[in-house]
Image (cartoon, helix red, strand yellow):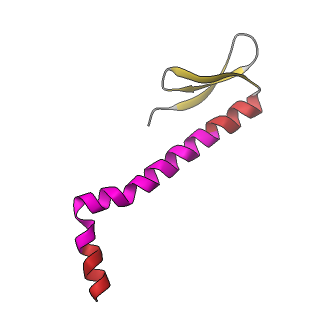
């Protein structure tokens, strides 16, 4: 995941930057911080949802079958 940050714009507003690309601009500081927090949380949820699929692809389902039969 690329870095998410809040930067001050030239006109006194704030922008949310992901990597080197602006995602949104023209926000107050509080709104920009809230937006960046939401982006981080949603990225964490996406990673968490992909985790069971990654475990299944790696062979974790065999281990789950052993636990179910015990």
Residue visible at 70% across and 38% down in the picture? 34
Q: Is residue 9 left or right of residue 46?
A: right
Residue visible at 38% across and 56% down in the picture? 51
Image location (x, y in percent) of residue 18: 52, 28
Residue visible at 30% across and 61% down in the picture? 55
Task: Using the rendered view, name the quadrant where residue 28 is placed.
Answer: top right
Residue 61 part of the magenta segment: yes
Image location (x, y in percent) of residue 21: 51, 20
Q: What range is drawn magenta here?
A: 37-62
Image location (x, y in percent) of residue 70: 28, 89
In the rendered image, the vertical position of residue 8 relative to residue 42, given as above or below: above
Q: Identify the residue at the far bottom of this view.
A: 70
Task: Using the rendered view, name the quadrant where residue 37 is placed.
Answer: top right
Quadrant in which the N terminus is drawn: top left
In the rendered image, the vertical position of residue 55 relative to residue 26, given as above or below: below
Nearer to me, 9 or 26:
26
Task: Using the rendered view, name the quadrant where residue 9 is placed.
Answer: top right
Residue 23 part of the magenta segment: no
Residue visible at 30% across and 75% down in the picture? 64
Q: How many marks?
A: 0
Image location (x, y in percent) of residue 6: 63, 27
Q: Identify the residue at the far top of this view.
A: 10
Q: Is residue 25 left or right of residue 64?
A: right
Magenta segment, principal secondary structure? helix
In the rendered image, the vertical position of residue 57 relative to residue 19, given as above or below: below
Q: Is residue 54 left or right of residue 29?
A: left
């Amino acid at each position: 995941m690329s870095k998410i940050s809040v930067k001050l714009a030239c006109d006194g507003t704030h922008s949310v930057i992901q990597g080197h690309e602006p995602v949104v601009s023209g926000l107050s500081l509080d709104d920009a911080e809230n937006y960046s927090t939401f982006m981080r949380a949603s990225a964490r949820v996406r990673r968490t949802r992909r985790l069971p699929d990654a475990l299944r692809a790696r062979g974790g389902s065999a281990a789950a079958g052993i636990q179910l039969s015990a």
